[in-house]
Image: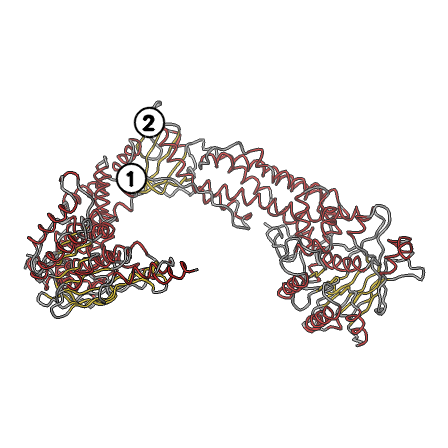
Amino acid sequence: MKAFLMYPDRDSYLGQDLPPNEADLAGDLELDIVLRAMADGDQFLFDVARLGLHSCITGPEEIVYRQRVLADCIAQPAVVRDLYDVAIEAVTAEKKVLGWIWRDSPETIVHRTRQLLEFYLDAFRQLRGVADTHAASFRSEGCTRFFAMLSKELGDEYLAEIEAHIGELAFRRGTLLSAALGKGNKGTGYLVRRQPEQNWRDRIPGMNKNGYSFYVAERDETGWRTLSDLTSRGLNGAANALAQSTDHIKAFFQMLRAELGFYLGCLNLRDRLLATGQQVCFPEPAGPPTRAEDARLTARGLYDASLALSLDEARAVGNDVDADGKQVIMITGANHGGKSTFLRSVGLAQLMMQAGMFVPAESFTASMSTGVFTHFKREEDATMEKGKLDEELDRMSTIAGRISAGGLLLCNESFASTNEREGSEIARQIIRALTEAGIRIVFVTHMYDLAGRYYAEHDPAALFLRAERRADGQRTFRVPPGEPLPTSYGEDLYQQVFGTADTEARV
Amino acid sequence: MNPEARFGSILFDPPLDRGERDDPSMLSDLNLDQVFAAVVAGRDEHDLMPFFRAPLRDVRAVEYRHEVQRDLEDEAVSQAVTEFADGMREGRKHLVQLAKLRHRYQKEQWFLDATSVYCQAVVALNDALAVTGLRSRGFLAFRQHLTEYTGSPAFASLVADIATMKRLLDEVRYCVNIKGNRVKVTSYEGEDNYGAEVQKTFAKFAENEVKDYHIGFRSWPEMNHVEEHILELVARLFPEVFQALDEFCARHERYIDKTIRTFDREVQFYVAYRDFIAPMKAAGLEFCYPAVSAGSKKLTIGKSFDLALAAKLMPDASAVVRNDLHLAGPERIIVVTGPNHGGKTTFARTFGQLHYLASLGLPVPAAEASLFLPDRVFTHFEREEDLATLRGKFEDELVRIRGVLDEATGDSVLVMNESFASTTLRDALFVGERVLGQMTGLGLLGVYVTFVDELASLNEACVSMVAMVVPDNPAMRTYELVRKPADGLAYAAAIAGKYGLTYRQLKERLAS
């Protein structure tokens, strides 16, 4: 039984692996801030939110499938939370049943799973109740199908069958075991059998099944132990089937909890972002570009959700981007001018779009990527044996081993750890190689030797943005198109920080 | 025709050559006691040690074993013998278990299994040997016996009875209904497997692999009174099956062929030794079947090594020192001199081991070997003082060598290690000259390890070999021995040089 709330054709994503560069993405794009907003203090929600955020769906149809389920959830948040509570209740049922078990035996397993089944039966009935009441008010394909599945698979007849098992597992007519002769004529292959239906003859002594009986004396401890041992052997297979079945049912509820949890996380994040006065929108996903000029990236009011969630009062600045048909976006300009923030907003929106989520923008359209990668400059690592440039090259080498055509690479001040000439040349060769392999790059740099010379080539597939600085030196944190300038605005920053200290120093 | 008349033993031909001798000090001097203990370890049931204590005197008997072992080198033969041995062992285990059991129907079923295991082992061995290219007299005769035995009507009826009996027992199915303290045994009438019913109900949830909740039950062969009671009731449900079982056991009480039983034990002599040397061979050490002679005392040994030491050094074959050795013409005794811990004792032991192992008809630890087949191997090693004899060490050694020389013949091998080291050089030279004289007088083959350089050139029967050191670093031994005149001074000068104590070094140091 599958819920199909996350994918139209696949099971839950719980077993999925995070991308190998997840730690880089989390650190460079400050993902934890977003994930914490989704989790709202719940570690489980944090984990499923993280898995969901890294879904990296590449088909626009699958993205729309999730977007519609999410839209339903936004319209009916209370129903989603009710279903989620049933799932939690069922997943934690074990804790109510599980005493402290010294040693498991098939008999104790049967006893325990019988109790568990009672809880699960109750949970099934609740799910059915929600489905019967609310199914009609959901519109999306995913939700409609989910409720239909509940009605079909958890029909009255089926629930009665489970109830019958719960009754039979008490073994009120004794335990009937079949056996054969094994090594040394010891009984072997003990297997519990369903007691045959009783009819009128069975109730008359002497008329029922032929055989020979004996009784174990009340004080015969060995004898009693042997009976218990034989029963356990016979129940072994049934106990296994029961325990596995309850595991499967638990897995169903875990899956349900995880899938609902993702949408619950989205609801939480939406509430938080809307509370900051920002907008969110469902993005329009475009298929992966086959040619460079097909690449799409157009946004209005694109902002960095991590920054928006961190700011107390001020609103994060939104940027407009028109980068359709561009393979390289090169960003230059003032320090602390919003370059990194913009870079992060592009990466985060891309991830959220490919997770089927809304994005932090007024509107957003982009091509699917085969993977988002980040290469940000790093603080010196104390444990590092290699030099900084070695470390950078090493990381880039790792990325190169993982990225493929259609990938999106975000570079932040890459190769600034060496001199500009050398760094530029390294970067140039990397950019050239990667773009020719069908990879899109957004590159933040101070290196004029890199950006300026690239600009001079007039490559139609390259877009140049520059962090804005007004005439009075004030930064707007916007990153509009602009050609690279031979100097950055470090001087400004210096003055702002040192102020009069600088003039005093000259005296 | 009685096959016993043609095939008697895979170890002995002619059957007369079965001399067994107790020579514990010689075996321990050569460290062969350790070797044999390791060889037979874990094979107590076959009682193999007596075979390792019974060297052969007859070249034909030695060659009989060589032939058998060459056949055993065939992978197919080897595997067939191994599987046969496993089967026979399994059968013995059954009988051991049977003896411990109480209930008649239990014992009888274990007996049935024992006969079945035996028949399978015998048939498999016969089938396997039939398609191998055997060449040894021993194996050819054994195969002949095996073919006749498995083709006999008695064996055929045993096999048929086993099959019938097993089928009857396999078909027994019954039910036990346990309710409280009541146990009811009935026949099985196709009642549904409840575990499968449960699985069916919940199959729709089975999306992923989950844990296996089967509990492992320990099983033991014994039954208690409840199980026995159940078995009795099962026997009442199926009386004809259990009557047939009683009859089977009475009919086949003695089912093992005596010749096959003997083969099973004796072939382990080869298998045990082969398994013991296998890791050494795998590590690159060479073994060979020595060419043995009852007449010529010309001796050629290539790349020989101490088997006991090599076994300890495994798997590092590079640490095993290998030595070459030749004796020709009148040469009989190798006199070994050189620095302490230079490999002299190891060399002496190797010499003794080669001759003893050769007389067991086994491969020897050398790449090539032409050996004289001795009537006996003697040793004379330095001993701890024995307080019980109230004699001094030197005296004790003299008493012992006297005994050896009284028993030894010109066809013996004598290994002397650091004999008479407890006395003065003068005495050692004096006694050594006389003992060596007697040895060369007898014409026996031997090794004489000594610190007395003069003995190395006593007469034309003596060959001098010296334990070598690394020229630049006299403290380091190569453990190799080479034929060259004894020269204790050369070593003394070298070791002194290392500490700057040679004459010239001391002159220079004192001059400054």
- Chain letter of disc 2 in the image: A
Residue B75 in view (yes/no): no
Residue A62 in view (yes/no): yes
Residue type highlighted by circle 2: Tyr
The x and y percentages for residue B97 are 24, 41
* Residue at the disc numbered 2: A215
Residue B221, labelled with which disc?
1
Disc 1 on helix, strand or loop?
loop
State the residue in front, B174 or B409: B409
State the residue in front, A38 or B417: B417
- Chain letter of disc 1 in the image: B
Residue type highlighted by circle 1: Pro
Relative to residue B430, is residue A169 depicted above or below? above
Residue furthest to the front in view is: B511
- Please give the name of the residue rendered at 25% of the width and 51% of the height, measured from the top-left corner: B38
State the residue in front, A162 or A24: A24
Disc 2 on helix, strand or loop?
strand
Asked whether the residues under the numbered discs 2 and 1 touch, taking CB atoms below 8 Å apart as contact, a structural biologist would say no
Judged left or right of residue A85, residue B185 is left
The x and y percentages for residue B505 are 38, 61
Residue furthest to the bottom in view is: A457
Relative to residue A267, is residue B367 depicted above or below? below
State the residue in front, A445 or A227: A445
Residue A29 quadrant = bottom right
Relative to residue A324, is residue B27 depicted above or below? above
User: Label 2 vs label 1: CA separation?
Assistant: 24 Å
Judged left or right of residue B60, residue A103 is right
